[in-house]
Image: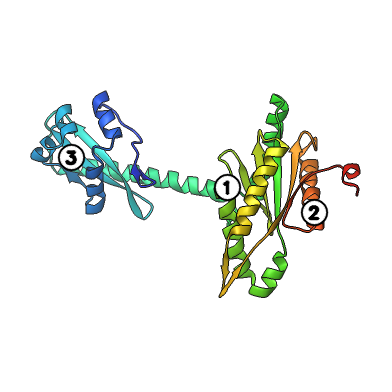
Amino acid sequence: IKEGGKFVIKGISGASLGLKQELAKGKLDFVYENVIESADPLYVMEADEIKSIEPLEKEGIVFFACIPLRIGPETKGVLMLASRIELRFDFDVAALFTLIGNNISLISEKVRLFQEAQRLAITDGLTGLYNVRYFYDMLNKEIARTKRYRTLFSLILFDIDNFKALNDTYGHQAGDEVLRSLASILKEASRETDVAARYGGEEFIIMLTNTPKHEALHLANRIREKIEEYNYHIEEDTVKITVSGGIATFPENAKDSKSLLYAADMAMYEAKAMGKKQVFCYRRTDEAGI
């Protein structure tokens, strides 16, 4: 199957270790490309062509056929059938090979549709980040894991400053473009283990596993600076966006998910109250002097 511009072997049987290694190195990638580009329903390699391909010749292959696999509207992969014994290729064999290819294509398409349905169920349609329902589920799981292993984790809650004014000036479509651009920055700046989600409206939240407050603050400020440096092109204008952020850490600042989210929210509102475009860590009411 072609994934990310490369061919990846999803299954192999009957081949020697040497041939598997050669296939893993991409020695037959040019064959797969030719099969996909030809768009023929079945490709059977001539004997002379087999002998000219070193990995197949060394394996003793005397029959080699390729069936393109359609996944969705495009041909995404190749099914290879090879034999070290001469096969009499006739209409019945061709029909059988085509049937096998069609069935694998159908199964692959069903798997793709199932995976896409799963992705859509946990993804925000506008930004491509996780949706809040998935975030809540992961938050509860992380709290349970943290309690079990006695570790910690932090939340960063971001809110776009003056977003209503931007919508009023340029319209909601422009606001949506800003949200998408900001989401891309969050994806790029977040670590693989982080869970970044659209929390609602112009709010975004990131869950940082095994991350103490000082590390969360460093990452939050790095993301905030990237957002502020980015040029958002709206109509003929170049607009700068700023965000305010709040950080809360479990279990230091809260004992459950509701109070943890409240703590991050309070920290973010303190940042807003103190002039916006900054990130505050949660402090108790007596510590904050409010």
Residue 128 appears in the picture as rendered? no
Q: Do the residues labelled 3 and 2 touch (CB within 8 Å)?
A: no
Q: What residue type is labelled 3?
A: Val
Quick check: 219 above or below 211? below
Give the residue drawn at x 65%, y 53%: 224
Mark in front: 3 vs 1: 1
Give the residue number, with chain letter if any, for mark 1: 189
Q: Position of residue 80 (x, y in %)?
A: 25, 38
Choose top left, top right, bottom left or bottom right for residue 247: top right
Give the residue drawn at x 25%, y 44%: 32
Secondary structure of the residue carrying tag 1 is helix
For mark 3, does the 10 Å Cα neighbourhood hold few (<14), some (14 to 19), or many (20 or more) residues? few
Q: Where is residue 20 in the image (x, y as percent from the top left)?
A: 28, 29
Q: Which mark is residue 86?
A: none
> How far is mark 3 from mark 1, CA to CA?
53 Å
Q: Which amino acid does label 1 sit on?
A: Ala
Taking 174 as reference, is 115 left or right?
left
> How far is mark 3 from mark 2, CA to CA?
70 Å
Name the residue nearer the viewer: 20 or 192: 192
Tell which circle, 1 or 2, labels the residue nearer the N-terminal end: 1
For mark 1, does the 10 Å Cα neighbourhood hold few (<14), some (14 to 19), or many (20 or more) residues? some
Q: Which amino acid does label 2 sit on?
A: Tyr
Give the residue number, with chain letter if any, for mark 2: 269
Give the residue drawn at x 36%, y 55%: 73
> How far is mark 1 from mark 2, CA to CA?
23 Å
Tell which circle, 3 or 2, labels the residue nearer the N-terminal end: 3
Taking 11 as reference, is 64 left or right?
left
Q: Which mark is residue 93?
A: 3
Quick check: 71 above or below 83? below
